[in-house]
Amino acid sequence: MLEIKHTLCPSCSVGCGINVILDDEAVVGSFPYKRHPVNEGKNCANGRKSIENFANKINEASISGGAVELIKAINEISKEIDASDKVTVVLSGNNSLKEAEAIKSFIDENNFSLLFYADDLRNFDEVASYEEIEKASSVLVIGDILYENPLIGRRIVHAKQNGAKIFSNIKAEKSVTANISDETTSVSVQEFLNNYKDNLDESSVIVFNTVDSSDDLDKIEELGSKILPVYSKTNTKGVLNIADPNSKDEVLELLANTKVLLVFNDDILNEFDFDFKSISIIISLSAFENDTTKASDVVVPVKSWLEYEGSFVNAMGESQNFSQVMESDALSIVEVIEKIKG
């Protein structure tokens, strides 16, 4: 029997609503949640792909021996982390608030190293709302927001239709954002901000999903305009309230000093240019197959966001709850941590 269930899109930090189509508990498709206040009936290709990713779902049946092997895998994790003094645990914006809190406590209790990468961005206490983007007199855009975060890009288009000037700085050779910009450059972030700071007033918004360095973040704050950092992962804003992020250089240094890498629902191999073969043991807890699970020595299947209830914090700082929309026999990340702790 076909059912339609409402949930949140997990593809970035915008916080869009999405409808999932189920046929006897199997995910068969998706379509936009028309009454959702964030995306107002629109979904991007990334959102649709997040649902299509269920074709790569890991379950106990994919592990030889099923539940018996799952118990062995959890015991193996306990053995490896007890035997090493160089354990690094990956926490990410893919984790819900409850998961992030449990992972952070697990790290602190065991004195493990924390690896949390937030796109070289950081937390900002005050950020612009999506509505403020639409009402801005000018918008400075750093990164190809219209391509990478289309539902924020839609608000920038609305701002332009309302008379705003759009100035963008994009390093890519081809850019969707450039198509609607009044002026586009491809310079350092510092130079871009210096060149266009005179176009800012009290209603202006700086929207960005990338920077060159932490100095750029200081400069953005110093300008005194409304700002909106857009993170690549769903709950990065929420996790930033729980843990301090690592820079890319700090991540590489951590990895170079790691013997056991414990990855909670992240694809770190797809993010960093590093020789992961130098790490003795890689352990992944993941709902879906990815480059990291393929390279891992131990893989534990866990529930996806469709299979439990929780909350994410979107880019503008709003906590959004999501409900369980389908059943699963898999353990949640929180449950696995409890079993590891014994």
Image (cartoon, helix red, strand yellow):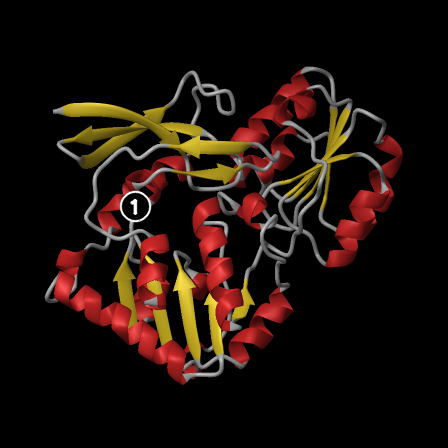
If the image is split into quadrants, where does the C terminus sit? bottom left
Residue at 64% x, 50% y: name it: 210
- When asked about the image quadrant of residue 72, the answer is bottom left
- When asked about the image quadrant of residue 129, the answer is top right
Above or below, 222 relative to 302: above
Q: Is residue 186 left or right of residue 73?
A: right
Residue topped by disc 1: 53
Residue at 72% x, 59% y: name it: 213
Mark count: 1
Mark 1: few/some/many CA within 10 Å (<14, 14-19, 20+)? some
Coordinates of residue 43 in the picture (x, y in percent):
42, 28
Above or below, 215 relative to 256: above
Residue at 53% x, 73% y: name it: 111
Coordinates of residue 130 in the picture (x, y in percent):
62, 26
Coordinates of residue 158 in the picture (x, y in percent):
62, 20
Coordinates of residue 78 in the picture (x, y in percent):
33, 74
If the image is split into quadrants, where does the N terminus sit? top left
Residue 96 visible in rendering: no
209 or 312, nearer to the observer? 312
Q: Tell me the kind of residue under disc 1.
A: Asn
Q: Is residue 26 left or right of residue 265?
A: left
Above or below, 113 relative to 39: below
Query: Element under label 1?
Result: helix
